[in-house]
Amino acid sequence: MRMTRIRILCGIVAGLSIAASGALTAQGPSATTPIDSPVAAVSNSAPWEYGAVLQGGVGLEQRTDFSFFMVGGHLGKVLTPQIGSGSLRGNLEYSIEVFPLWQSYTPKFQRISCAGVSVGCSVPYTVGGTFTGVSITPIQVRWNFTHGKRFMPWIQAAGGVVWTNHKYPAVGDLDPTDPTQTGPAADTSVWNFTPQGGIGAHYFLKPRRSMDFSVNAVHISSASLGDKNPGVNVSLQMSVGYTWWK
């Protein structure tokens, strides 16, 4: 099920990328009025934008068996007029994202908990599996490139936090002589931080309506709020969304 979701999301992102690239190639140098250029319509003011977001991805490096899926919303405000010229011309935007549904799918395995080395150990029990939680990214700074007509790329840096219904990620093993994995200080945290950065684009289907897609590198770490902080060093996450501009 989780891989099916990821494949569907990847297909949507790829399709939108091809469509948007074709539209960008077809743009001519002539008209840039708000009617002919939806990008100009939102770039010559300081609008709000809000929309729905579907995001998912996979872990990298030592976490290739981790995957992610989330559903939420985005709210942003353009802070500056257009700055610069040529292909780098753009504006600065501040935004937040909230995912009321955040899930991570991880391998299941057996572990034990011991009061001391080979003393007072529990029977084996299963950890890992699906973690469900809520994620908020309250700091999201974007630079929108506004030289196009319908296609508006952007780059961003962001930071957030995620809460999960179990301590994430799971750790442990079945070795009673290894207190780092089975001792009383062998646990993680339900709170993790999510520093991230990425690229994306708005493709305007009509004035003040855009389809959005992005690719983000997301780091997940508890900053040692728990006894152990294995985290997810790098995950690659893709999103698709739909935005209204006001």
Image: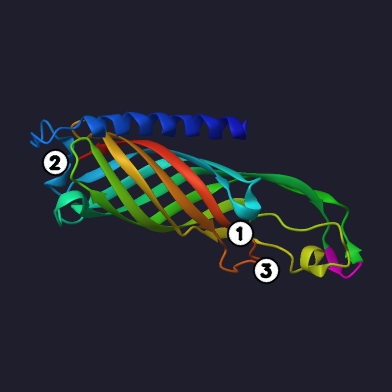
| Residue 205 appears anywhere in the view | no
At x 7% / y 36%, what residue is drawn? 33
Per the image, the residue denoted by label 3 is 227
The answer to whether residue 9 is left or right of residue 225 is left
Q: Quadrant of the N terminus?
A: top right
Determine which of the numbered discs, if any, sits on residue 40 in the image. Answer: 2
Q: Residue at x 64, y 51 (%)?
A: 63
The part of the image, by quadrant, that contains residue 53 is: top left
Quick one: quadrant of the C terminus?
A: top left
Residue 34 on image: x %, y %: 10, 36
Amino acid at the residue labelled 3: Asp
User: Seen in the image, is 231 located left or right of residue 195?
Assistant: right
The first of marks 2 and 3 along the sequence is 2
Q: Is residue 141 above or below residue 3?
A: below
Cα separation, mark 1 vs mark 3, equals 12 Å
- Would residue 226 be seen by someone viewing this image from the given angle? yes
Q: Which comes before the other along the chain, label 2 or label 1? A: 2
Amino acid type of the residue that numbered disc 1 sits on in the rendered structure: Gly
Measured in 3D between alpha carbons, the distance from the residue under mark 2 to the one under mark 3, in whole angstroms, is 51 Å
| Number of the front mark, 1 or 3 | 1
| Type of amino acid under label 2 | Ala
**Crowd band around label 2 with a 10 angstrom C-alpha radius: few (<14), some (14–19), many (20+):** many
Residue at 64% across, 66% down = 226
Percent from the top left, x then y, of residue 162?
Answer: 52, 54
Q: Which residues are magenta?
A: 114-118
- Relative vertical location of residue 127 with respect to residue 212 in this rendering, above or below: below
Local crowd at mark 3 within 10 Å, few (<14), some, or many (≥20)?
A: some
Q: Find the distance from the CA under tag 2 to the CA under tag 1.
A: 42 Å
